[in-house]
Amino acid sequence: MKNVLLPLLLLLSCCTYGQKKFHVIAFYTGEQDQAHISYVHEANKWFDSVATANNFAYRPTRNWSLLNEDTLQGYQVVMFLDTRPEKPEQRAAFQSYMEKGGAWIGFHFAAFALTPSAVPANWDWYHNTFLGSGAYVSNTWRPTSAVLRVEDRKHPVVKGLPPTFKSSPNEWYRWSNDLTKNPDIDILLAIDSSSFPLGTGPKQYEIWHSGYYPVVWTNKKFRMVYMNMGHNDIDYENHTNKELSFTFDNPIQGKLVLQALLWLGRGKK
């Protein structure tokens, strides 16, 4: 990974001189699904490795009680790496933080909601107003690379990215809401049709053959970016739980993530 990170660091850190340092707090749970746990561990190492060169401080935590008004005052960006807050007071603190100009970046399972499940669709503001995606509907399987297409070439988050690029393997989500019909949502990346069929099954409904699937977007009413990436490939079939892929091994995808974070962290609250 060092060979991938070095040119990325040089490219982005060359513009950090004179920039005020910003602070990031990344919440995670890291208890459900080995693929999500693998991603969280990888993400924490990766963000920490690029923090100094890009002039930000990175604080990962499993202590969701820190999601309160007093603590959030000290951070310019909040991350949800794998889950969302469940307690009413934590949700209220996060909503207030965002409505007052705070910044957020979330990954993969952080947008998941399905009733009935252990993560029910019981937070309307977050899933419908803020994310715009609504509830989870289905996913591809197994984790597979996709060709991603840049949809908004003018947005700073995708600056310098090629028109299309191949992602790291991921489990891709489909949502109940049509994001293209929401005027507040700016879709930055979507799955390109050259990816189809996407997924290998074995169940046929886990393989996508057509459709439009946003994977990275922002809500223009908030300072936020959601990314559907965040599920590494794991050897479940042979019961080894061996990691078969890594999200940040992909330099273009790494550039996308870092540019999103820097855009949020250096913006005005």
Image: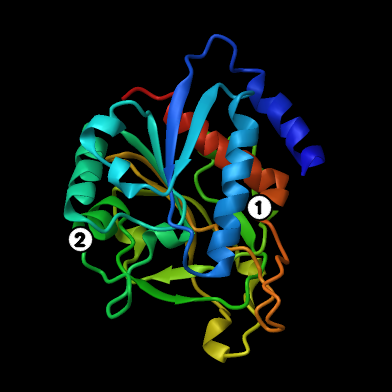
Q: Tell me, what colour scheme is on the image? A: rainbow
Q: Name the residue nearer the viewer: 105 or 217.
A: 105
Helix, strand or loop under label 2: helix
Q: Quadrant of residue 220?
A: top left
Residue 64 placement, left or right of 38: left
| Residue 101 shows in the view | no
Q: Amino acid at mark 1?
A: Thr
List x then y, in percent, for residue 261: 50, 35
In the rendered image, which residue does mark 2 sit on?
124
Q: Earlier in the sequence, mark 2 or mark 1?
A: 2
In the rendered image, which residue does mark 1 sit on?
164
Q: Residues within 10 Å of mark 2 (few under 14, many from 20)?
A: few
Residue 76 placement, left or right of 249: left
Q: Amino acid at mark 2?
A: Asp
Above or below: residue 30 compared with residue 15: below
- Choose mark 2 or mark 1, whichever is in front: 2
Residue 126 placement, left or right of 209: left
Above or below: residue 83 compared with residue 173: above
